[in-house]
Amino acid sequence: QVQLVESGGGLVQAGGSLSLSCAASERTFSSYAMAWFRQAPGKEREFAAAIRWTSANTHYADSVKGRFTISRDNAKNTVYLQMNSLKPEDTAVYYCAATTKPLPYYSTQSLYNYWGQGTQVTVSS
């Protein structure tokens, strides 16, 4: 069973930056797309960003567009999320997700069949 292992969360002041990483446990794992979702306290989990593995086409939620950048390293089977200009409302547990099947919509959580354990990001005001 492939595992997604996240790292890089932490505490940062508003306006600061953090970078998250998510590595697949098996080098032979071949995903169609990988994504980052987040869940703030008391709220439902929401889509943040996604990247198609072969083409590197990216998709972003409006709330993070222009501030977050998703990228991937094929050799390391790792996806990254660079978060800049962080705001207190970005505080959440960030989850990495992957799917091996083509997606009609990158923001639909139920279409992802692999999930990481989550990493906490806290942005202080």
Image (cartoon, grey):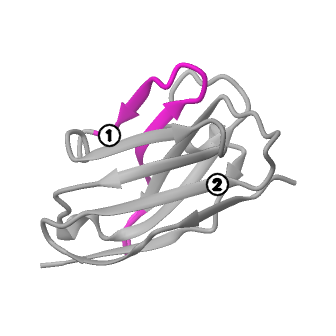
Which mark lies nearer to you, 2 or 1? 2
Q: What element carries label 2?
A: strand
Q: Is mark 1 on a helix, strand or loop?
A: loop
Locate residue 21, reporting x and y percent: 51, 58
Tally the marks. 2
The residue type indicated by label 2 comes to Ala
Cα distance, mark 2 to mark 1?
Answer: 22 Å
Residue 54 figure quarter? top right
Q: In this view, does 95 lie to the left or right of 40?
A: right
Q: Residue tagged by mark 2?
A: 23
Q: Does the magenta stretch include residue 31?
A: no
Question: Going 45% across and 60% down the picture, which residue do you hit?
Answer: 20
On screen, 90 above or below 13? above
Locate residue 27, reporting x and y percent: 78, 45
On screen, 32 above or below 95? above
Locate residue 64, reporting x and y percent: 26, 46
Question: Going 18% across and 67% down the picture, which residue do you hit?
Answer: 16
Range drawn in magenta: 39-61
* Residue 118 numbered tag: none
